[in-house]
Image (cartoon, rainbow, N blue to C red):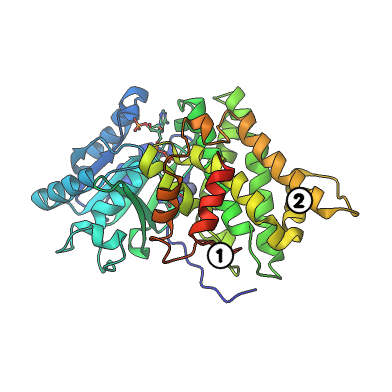
């Protein structure tokens, strides 16, 4: 096991009607709030009224910025920064999913910074200050509600890049599973694949003696595998929605990678796909992950065997362990397919025209490698994309 530091300061407020507490929760943390949300689902579902009433009841002034779209854009972030400065905003409340939250986090670090907020995303600067961010989550998926990350797309050059800073970890996140009843099935499925991918990025490691985190990863994966199909059949099954929602946070709050080296190559590759083709991140991962698995499994067959046996209950083939490993990959692929996701680029209507460009962008023109389970150069990334066709 590797040395590690674990601290997750996000307060999680979980359960029925917890969104009604949002005003009280902000009290003492901020006096003027930017309410930031997406394309309008929160108005249709009635959540907008509940949140704004709670703010008013607690005497909290707020200004609004709607329009954070899936794969949130830098243009809106800059608009948000200006609004915050003009209105002396001291707290940002994101109501929505990863896109609204990541956009809010970008605004939060951009406001006190003199330069271009993109500097944090292309590694030119490190954030020193941020406005606090709070969250009311409406889709379990990205895990941004308790993560120190934000992913934003710069329109010019279609660059999708992430930043990391403890300063942007939300101070609180309100998770009411009932708020996810209205999710379209496709978004529910994309969320499930994203959270599974967050676990798999951590599970596939060469670090040894990580029994506890292996078991935590396996347990969280099995919870999603059991409950995602249930919520797709019964959208208002509270307990199944609750299991999925909590799993999504656990998948990406830092606990599951304690003491182990994680990978993140598949996310790096997927971000290039969603940057160019604007597909849902979870759908892109359902395509990339199986291809990545097929490409790298020989690097550590035993880990893939363990995954197949423990997560998918594949019967161990002692004569030919590779067959067991491959069966685990096949079951993963079929699971994604079974919940209605694409598992090939073709199914997302993406051809092979821009594979080279994506491989090049993902590896900074071949200057860096991706991943740790197996270090991938530009040619490897290209080959994985080719396998995903
Ligand atoms: O925009 P609205 O109208 O709200 O609709 C959204 C959006 O169209 C809709 N939706 C959300 N909750 C709903 C709902 N519709 C009905 N009822 C509800 N309760 O769902 C759509 C998707 O929302 P979005 O916020 O884009 O989803 P998600 O949470 O999957 O976020 C994706 C973004 O997060 C990034 C991804 O790259 C992508 O840009 N990620 C962020 C991470 C992080 N910050 O730690 C890690 C992840 O790996 C990921 O990269
Ligand atoms: Zn993800």
Residue sitting at the far right: 319
Can you name the residue that lies furthest to the left here? 86
The mark that comes first in sequence, 2 or 1, is: 2
Q: Say left or right for 42 vs 231.
A: left
Other residues around mark 1 within 10 Å, as few (<14) / some (14–19) / many (≥20): some
The image position of residue 169, as x and y in percent, is 38, 58
Which of the 4 image quadrants contains residue 28? bottom left
Residue 21 visible in the picture: no
Q: Give the residue pinned by disc 2.
A: 325
In front of the other: 364 or 242: 364
Image point (46%, 50%), residue name? 12
Residue at (27% x, 50% y) in the render: 27
Q: Residues within 10 Å of mark 2 (few under 14, many from 20)?
A: many
Q: Is residue 268 left or right of residue 310?
A: left
Q: Position of residue 73 (x, y in %)?
A: 27, 44
Q: Position of residue 92 (x, y in %)?
A: 26, 49
| Vertical relation: 352 (above or below) 117 | above
Task: Say which element carries label 2.
Answer: helix
Quadrant of the image containing the C terminus: top right
Q: Specify the quadrant that holds the N terminus.
A: bottom right
User: Could you say whether the residue bearing mark 1 is in a helix, strand or loop?
Assistant: loop
Q: Out of 375 and 184, give the one closest to the viewer.
A: 375
Residue at 37% across, 64% down: 166
Label 2 to label 1: alpha-carbon separation: 20 Å
Viewer-closest of 154 and 358: 358
In the rendering, which numbered label is found on residue 375?
Answer: 1
* Residue pictured at 44% horizontal, 37% vertical: 280
């Amino acid at each position: 096991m590797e040395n590690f530091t674990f601290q997750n300061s996000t307060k999680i407020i979980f359960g029925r009607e917890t969104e009604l507490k949002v005003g009280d929760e902000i009290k003492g943390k901020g006096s003027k709030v930017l309410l930031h949300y997406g394309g309008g689902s929160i108005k249709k579902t009635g959540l907008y009224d509940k949140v704004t009433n709670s703010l008013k009841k607690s005497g909290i002034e707020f200004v609004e910025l709607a329009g954070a779209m899936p794969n949130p854009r830098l243009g809106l972030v800059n608009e948000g920064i200006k609004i915050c400065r003009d209105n002396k905003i001291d707290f940002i409340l994101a109501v929505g999913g990863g896109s609204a939250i990541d956009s809010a986090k970008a605004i939060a670090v951009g406001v006190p910074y003199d330069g271009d907020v993109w500097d944090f995303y292309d590694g030119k600067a490190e954030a020193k200050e941020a406005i606090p961010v709070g969250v009311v989550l409406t889709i379990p998926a990205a895990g941004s509600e308790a993560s120190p990350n934000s992913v934003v797309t710069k329109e010019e050059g279609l660059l999708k890049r992430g930043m990391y800073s403890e300063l942007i970890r939300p101070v609180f996140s309100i998770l009411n599973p009932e708020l996810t009843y209205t999710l379209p099935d496709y978004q529910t499925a994309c969320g499930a694949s994203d959270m599974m991918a967050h676990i798999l990025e951590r599970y596939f490691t060469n670090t040894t003696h990580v029994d506890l985190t292996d078991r935590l990863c396996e347990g969280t994966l099995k919870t999603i595998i059991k409950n995602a199909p249930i919520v797709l059949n019964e959208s208002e099954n509270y307990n199944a929605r609750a299991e999925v929602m909590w799993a999504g946070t656990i998948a990406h709050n830092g606990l599951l990678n304690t003491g182990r080296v994680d990978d993140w190559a598949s996310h790096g590759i997927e971000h290039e796909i969603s940057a160019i083709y604007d597909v849902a991140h979870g759908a892109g991962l359902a395509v990339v992950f199986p291809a990545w698995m097929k490409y790298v499994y020989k690097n550590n067959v035993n880990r893939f065997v363990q995954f197949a046996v423990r997560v998918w209950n594949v019967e161990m083939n002692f004569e030919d362990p590779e067959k067991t490993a491959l069966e685990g990959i096949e079951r993963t692929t079929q699971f994604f397919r079974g919940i209605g996701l694409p598992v090939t680029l073709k199914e997302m209507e993406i051809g092979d025209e821009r594979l080279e460009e994506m491989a090049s962008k993902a590896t900074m023109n071949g200057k860096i490698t991706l991943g740790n389970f197996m270090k991938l150069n530009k040619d490897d990334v290209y080959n994985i994309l080719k396998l995903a066709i």
